[in-house]
Image (cartoon, rainbow, N blue to C red):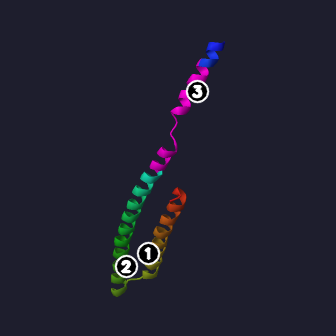
């Protein structure tokens, strides 16, 4: 019984040493922060290009006298708000 208890304590100690420490957690957070901001910047550039394309489409439709331009404007406006709020939401979600 004495040997069994000693072996369990030694194995428990080895299992505790195998857990990641504070340094590893800080490194993982730093890696997430670096990749998140580059992806966030990329998404803002893509959103800008898509937004400009939508604005040109709406302008062209308005100049050509097409109907329902107001629904296109609303869709374009709310998509821009969604992109902006999605970035803030993801920052809050990941704690960055």
**CA distance separating discs 2 and 1:** 8 Å
Mark 1 to mark 3: distance in Å?
A: 59 Å
Q: Are marks 2 and 1 in contact (CB under 8 Å)?
A: yes
Depth check, mark 1 against mark 3: the one in front is 3
For label 2, the residue is 55
Question: Which residue is at the front of the view, 66 or 19?
Answer: 19
Residue range of the region highlighted in magenta in the rendering: 7-28
Q: Mark 1 = which residue?
A: 76
Q: Is residue 26 magenta?
A: yes
Q: Sequence-wise, which precedes: disc 1 or disc 3?
A: 3
Q: Residues within 10 Å of mark 1 (few under 14, many from 20)?
A: some
Main SS category, magenta section:
helix
* Percent coordinates x, y for residue 68 in the rendering: 44, 80
Q: Which mark is residue 33?
A: none
Coordinates of residue 74 in the picture (x, y in percent): 48, 77
Q: Which residue is mark 3?
A: 12
Above or below 45: residue 10: above
Say whether disc 2 or disc 1 marks the residue closer to the N-terminus: 2
Contact, mark 3 vs mark 2 (Cβ under 8 Å): no
Ranked by sequence position, the earlier of labels 3 and 2 is 3
- As drawn, 29 above or below 47: above
Image coordinates of residue 40 in percent, x first then y, are 41, 63
Q: Nearer the viewer, residue 79 or 96?
A: 96
């Amino acid at each position: 019984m004495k040997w069994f208890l000693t072996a369990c304590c030694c194995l428990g100690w080895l299992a505790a040493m195998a857990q990641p420490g504070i340094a590893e957690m800080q490194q993982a957070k730093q890696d997430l922060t670096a990749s998140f901001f580059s992806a966030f910047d990329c998404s803002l550039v893509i959103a800008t290009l898509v937004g400009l394309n939508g604005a040109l489409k709406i302008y062209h439709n308005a100049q050509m006298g097409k109907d329902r331009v107001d629904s296109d404007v609303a869709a374009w406006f709310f998509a821009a708000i969604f992109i902006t709020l999605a970035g803030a939401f993801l920052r809050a979600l990941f704690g960055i």
